[in-house]
Structures are given as structure tokens and as C-alpha cells.
Amino acid sequence: MERILFFVLAAVALVSGVLLVTRRNPVLSVIYLVVNFFALAGLYLLLSAQFIAAIQIIVYAGAIMVLFLFVIMLLNLGDEEKLAEHVNARRIAGVALAVALGVEIVAVFLVKAGSGLAVKSPAAAAIGTAEGVGRALFTRFLLPFEVTSLLLLAAIVGAILLAKKKMD
Amino acid sequence: MSVTGSDLLGILAVGIVSVTALIAMLAGVFLKNSARLVMWLGLAGMAGAFAAAWGTYPSAGTAFGGMILAGGYASFFGMLILCAGILTFLLASDYLRKEGVEYPEFYVMVLFAVSGMMLMSAAADLIIVFLGLEIMSVSLYVLAGFMRRREKSIEASLKYFLLGAFATGFLLYGIALIYGTMGTTDLAGIALRFASAPPPSLFWVGAGLLLGGFAFKVGAVPFHMWVPDVYEGSPTPVSGIMSTGGKAAAFAAFLLVFVKSLGGGGAKVQTLLAIFAALSMVTGAVIAIAQKNLKRMLAYSSIAHAGYMLTGLAAANQLGESGVLYYLVAYTFMNIGTFGVISLIEQAEEKRLEFSDYAGLGLRQPFLGIVMSIFLFSLAGIPPLAGFFGKYYVFAAAVDAHMTWLAIVGVLASVVSVYYYLRVVVFMYFHEGPEGAEVISVPLLGSVALLLSAAGVVGIGVFPSSILSLTGWFF
């Protein structure tokens, strides 16, 4: 059952990911992104990471997507010509290199997957809960947790600085 | 786990910088025309943090349950990055006024960047590497675009942001794969597992992605495409700290992960690093010849210098490691100094940035001519200045590690580099300046910064053991 669910969710995530980058209409892209996010949340659930799954839906599928839609609305990307891609040698080389890297990584996964990936440990269920995540954040990962606030603050100040109309 | 006094003492230096950044931010919000005040506040904070780093230097260990390094290595890089920050502050205030953008936020962002760099260079866990890197990068993206009316500044910011975000993605995916295969993000834990059994091949995919991320941040070929445009477009003091503090922090984390934790990573990684090093040295040196704009020339030269430092990493022996640390100190002083002189001579609207603008400068303005010559001679690697010993150590390390070919490439690249560094000196002393050329008044703070940098370049060049005795026991 778990295995079937995994393949279904993985297929949905992959297909929506491909559709996301191939659609001409930006709104359609965003919708496929939402589908992708939901599939990912399902995969997290299969890994017993309930907290991450919930956060994935609340933050990404919720807040971030609304932001995306607003930006698309404000930019008014009705003219699809603007988004049209031009094919040139540099772009072809870039795509070729990206495909090569992707194939390499997939090959490593296929050939060596068994030796490297740890099987899901029984402890995973305890770590994935909100309680488990909270406990980890405030004990072992206390410093990274606090430092993240510094990162967010720097990002907020920086964003305001660049977007502000007039400096005084 | 409860936080103890020794934990707080361990992050004292970076804590002081972060708290100063917060106070400076609030002062900038609530007080009018507070740019000067914020600058002095930041200088005082960084001086205090320097004292804290110096004081905790003898007590090397970790804090917060093995999350972050304290004392020793962390203090060394803390002091180096704080030097870069202090010099940047001194040079920036007059530059910003000249360009009409003297706002307190500039100093706040530099303080954020400095605290990110310090965190990154003290990381004992891959999560801290990532967070430090992001704090530094986000602040630098903003600082690159600080002159919002200048098209090139915005272009620099956007390019740096898009490519940097991509590189961060690589780095993070690498960290995820390493965590997946090793079961921990703790560098000491990774080192234990790496030493006990050969890691699975997925680990190497992760390590490769991590390597790409680091190579991007230090600006090494083939991840160097952003360097020229970003250094040229950013405000000049920002290019200075980007190329020195940013590079020092990235190399510090690079060393922690690949040398301290993975013991050089084995022959394959060393060969890869050697190829990166050789490509960087050659590409940087050759393209720099064709540049007319001094900032762009220095950008290509910084790619070449990243190559020299990677040579020490590729050698992965004790001489190479202390050589890289020495090189970073030398490079910080000479490069901030060079960008400092450029920022003083530069005029609003990106004027006076070309070689020809330096004609006759040495005779017209003896002080600027002499310090600029010191920095350029040091960058070219002429003894007894600091740049010479830096190159000497990393090349000697390469020979020791049976990479003689790499040392030969390095020496050839530095011979080529003499041409474009000394070309500036030739323009300054052997070309007639235009009739009635304006004499630039050198501001007090700026000249203090230039004097300090020049003293650093000469001082650690004449007494290289002063740095080596500080770093000798790290590896």
C-alpha cells in the first residue's frame, strides 16, 4: 500500500514539475506548482514527517502560492511573446550539461541506491511530529534556530532597502 | 540542553557583531541623519568583537553542543573578517557621501554580512555553514545594489542574486545528500564515519555539489561568471569586502569541510581542486590583461587569486593549509587597500576608473601613489611583501604534494599578472598627467584605512611567522 502510494505521488510530482516548466501561461504554471507541492506533502507523510507535511501545505501551497499569483497579476504577463524562449548555442549547451548532470545523479541513485540510503528507521515516527521537531529545535539545534532569525531580519531589512521609494 | 556561560563565551565575538547590527538598525530608524553615528557605533562594536575574538583565541573548543567552533580557528577568522569590516567602514563613509548615498542602512547590512561570514568560518555543522553563507550572501546581494540609481549596480545585484541563489541550491542539495548518506550534519561525526568506512557513492554526489557551491562563492573557474560584472557594478567598498571577507569566509568553510573533516577528500577530489586551481589562475591572469577598467581588472585578478589559494587546498598538506590561511590574511589587506585607493580616486557616475585616469598620479599625489604601489607589488607577488610569501607557501605545498605541474602553472600565471599590476604603476609614475589635473583631497578616515592596510601588507610580509605561529596548530 505504502509502495503504491509512493509511486503514485512521485509520478504526480514529476509530471506536474515537467508541466510547470513547459506551460506558456504563467497562471497554469502556478497551478501545476500547487499540485507539485501537494504531492510532495504526501511524500513527506509517507516518511512519517507529519509536521513538515503540514508546513509544506500551509507555507508553500498557501502563502507562497498566493504571493506568486499576486506577482503574476501585478506584472500582467498577458503578452506571451515576452516569455518566448530563443534557442541559441549557449542555451543548447546549458541544457545538454544540465541533462548530463541529471543523468549522472539518476545513474548513481539507480546503481547504488541500496548501499547508501538508510531505510526508514522506527524512530522516524517520533521525530516527525510537531513535538519532536520542537524538541530538536530548542535543544540540539538551538543555535541554528536563533541564527535563522538573524537571516530573516537581514533579508527583511535588505528587501525594504531595495524596494523603498525614497531614502532619507 | 541548557545554554551555559561557556556556550555564550564561545560565540561572544559574533554575538557582539550581531547585537551591534541590531542596535545600529534601531538607531538608523529612530534618529535622523544618523549615518555617521551608526558608523562609529559599528566600528566600536567590531573593535569590541575583535578584542573578544583575541581574548577567546587560546581556548579552542566547540560551543552549543558541537554546533559551532569557539576560539582558535574561529577566533583567527573572526579577527581577519573583522579587520576587513573595519577597513570597509573607514573607506565607505567618504565614498558614500561622494556618491550621495550615505545612509545608515549601508553599515547595518555590512554588519549583518560580517556576522554571517564569522558564523560560516566557525561552523562545526553543515547547517551553520549554510545559515552563515545565506546571511552573508543576502546582505551582499543588497549591498551590491545599494546605489539604486546606477544601472550597473542594479545589474550587479540582480546577477549576483540569481546566480547566487542557484549556487545555494547546489550547496543545499549537496548537504542533503551528505546527511542522507552519513546520517548526520555534524562535521566531526561525518569525519568519524568517513575515516571508518568508504562512503557510498551518493555521498560523493553530495560532496561534488557542495564543492560546486563553495567554488561559486570563492569565485573559482568554472563558477566565476558572476565575478567581473558584480565587482564592477557594486559600490567600490562593497567589492572590497566581497572579495576579501566573503572569500575568507568561503575558504574557511571549504577548509573545515574538505580538509579538516574529509582529510583532503582523497586523490580524486584533490585532482579536481588542482584542475579548478589551474583553470582559475590561467583564466584570471589572461583575461585581466585585456581590461581597461581597474575594478574589472581586479575582479579577474581575484579569480586568479582564488586559484592560488585553491592550490594550497589541492595540496592538502600542512604547509598548504597554513599557506591558504596566510594567503587570505595577505589578500585581505592588499585587496581592500587597492579597492580603497580606487574608491578615493573614483568620482560619481563611475568616472576615473580607467588606467589612463591614473596617469601622473604618483607624482601629483605621493601618498596615494606609494600605498597603491605597495598593494600592487604585493598582489603581483614581489618580495618582501605579503603577497610573495602567500604564493611561495602554496606553491611549495603543491611541490611537496607531487603537483609540480600546478606550481609551474601558478608561477607562469603570476609572471603574466605582473604585467597588468605594474601597468598601473607605470601609468602612475611614467605617464604625464593631463594639464591642470585636479588634486584629490584624501579624507582622514580613508587615509587611516590605507595606512593600516599598507602596514599589514608590509608587516606580515617582513614577519610571516607572526601569522604562521597563530595558525600552525590548527590542522
Image: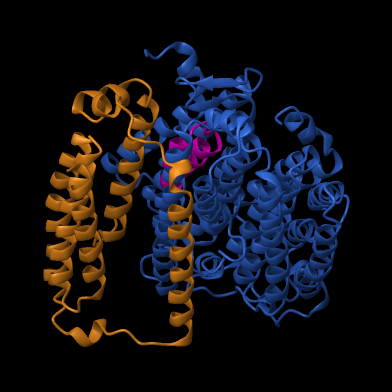
Chain colours: A orange, B blue
Residue B265 vertical placement versus A97 (above, below): above
Q: Residue at x 31, y 36 (%)?
A: A149
Image quadrant occupied by the C terminus of chain B:
top right
- Residue in front for this viewpoint, A10 or A149: A10
Q: Residue at x 23, y 62 (%)?
A: A165
Q: Would residue A9 be counted in the magenta stretch?
A: no
Specify start and end residues of the magenta stretch as a single range. B110-136
Residue B383, given in percent of the width and then of the height, sits at: 88, 53
Residue A105, given in percent of the width and then of the height, sits at: 46, 58
- Residue in front for this viewpoint, A168 or B181: B181
Q: Would residue B115 be counted in the magenta stretch?
A: yes
Describe residue B222's horizontal placement relative to residue A40 as left or right: right
Q: Residue at x 47, y 42 (%)?
A: A116
- Residue in front for this viewpoint, B472 or B232: B472
Tally the marks.
0
Residue B347, given in percent of the width and then of the height, sits at: 54, 70
Residue A8, given in percent of the width and then of the height, sits at: 18, 55
Note whether residue B15 is visible: yes
Q: Splitting the image into 4 quarters, where does residue B342 fall?
A: bottom right
Residue B206 vertical placement versus B52 (above, below): below
Q: What secondary structure characterizes most of the magenta part?
A: helix
Q: Splitting the image into 4 quarters, where does residue B169 fall?
A: bottom left
Note whether residue B132 is visible: no
Image quadrant occupied by the N terminus of chain B:
top left
Describe residue A140's horizontal placement relative to residue B380 as left or right: left
Describe residue B231's horizontal placement relative to residue B304 as left or right: left
- Residue in front for this viewpoint, B22 or B30: B22
